[in-house]
Image: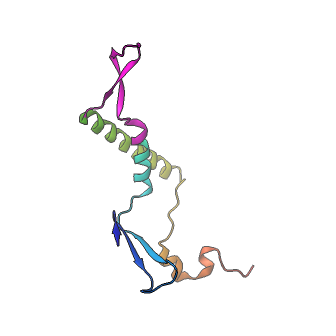
C-alpha cells in the first residue's frame, strides 16, 4: 500500500500481528526541514494592513500575494543555506556513515558490543 510516497509492506501474508516495513520514498534532508521551519516563521499567510482598519480600529489582515510568498520562500531558503554553511565552518556538524556500513561493520561500531 502506498500513501503519499510511503510504502507499507506486510512482512508475512497471514500474519497474526500487524508488522510491516515502513519505507519512505520521498525524504527531505535536515537542511530542507530547517528551511521549511524558517519559511514557516517568515511566511504567515496574512499580513497586517498599514492603511485599512476594521470598525473597532484594529488593523485588517491582508492575504499575501504569490510574489510576496516567493520572496519570503527564497529568503527562508537563503537563511537556511547560510546557517548550514556556518555550522559546517564551525565544525558543528558530523557526517555519520550509511546504515549499511554500520551494520556490515558489526555490533561494536554502533556501541552495542556488550563486552565491557
Name the quadrant of the N terminus.
Answer: bottom left
Q: Is residue 80 found left or right of 94 in the rendered image?
A: left
Taking depth in this image into account, of 14 and 73 the one nearest to the observer is 14
Q: Is residue 52 found left or right of 108 in the rendered image?
A: left
What number of labels is visible?
0
Q: In this view, does 102 lie above or below 48?
A: below
Residue 115: where, in percent of width, then height? 73, 82
Q: How is the image coloured?
A: rainbow
Q: Is 48 part of what is drawn in magenta?
A: yes
Q: Is 50 part of what is drawn in magenta?
A: yes
Taking depth in this image into account, of 92 and 60 the one nearest to the observer is 60
Q: Is residue 69 found left or right of 89 in the rendered image?
A: left
Residue 80: where, in percent of width, then height? 41, 45
Residue at left offset 48%, top offset 84%: 15
Residue 27: where, in percent of width, then height? 38, 62
Identify the image quadrant of residue 45.
Answer: top left
Identify the image quadrant of residue 43.
Answer: top left
Taking depth in this image into account, of 6 and 81 the one nearest to the observer is 6
Residue at left offset 40%, top offset 47%: 36
Residue 107: where, in percent of width, then height? 61, 81
Q: Give the range drawn in magenta.
A: 39-65
| Residue at the outermost right position | 116
Residue at left offset 40%, top offset 36%: 42
Identify the image quadrant of residue 26.
Answer: bottom left
Name the quadrant of the C terminus.
Answer: bottom right
Amino acid at each position: 500500500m502506498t500513501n503519499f510516497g510511503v510504502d507499507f509492506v506486510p512482512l508475512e501474508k497471514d500474519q497474526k500481528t500487524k508488522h510491516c516495513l515502513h519505507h519512505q520514498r520521498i525524504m527531505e534532508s535536515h537542511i530542507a526541514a530547517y528551511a521549511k521551519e524558517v519559511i514557516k516563521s517568515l511566511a504567515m499567510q496574512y499580513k497586517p494592513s498599514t492603511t485599512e482598519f476594521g470598525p473597532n480600529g484594529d488593523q485588517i489582515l491582508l492575504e499575501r500575494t504569490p510574489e510576496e510568498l516567493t520572496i519570503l520562500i527564497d529568503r527562508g531558503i537563503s537563511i537556511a543555506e547560510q546557517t548550514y554553511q556556518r555550522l559546517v565552518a564551525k565544525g558543528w556538524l558530523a557526517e555519520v556513515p550509511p546504515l549499511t556500513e554500520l551494520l556490515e561493520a558489526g555490533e561494536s561500531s554502533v556501541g552495542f558490543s556488550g563486552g565491557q
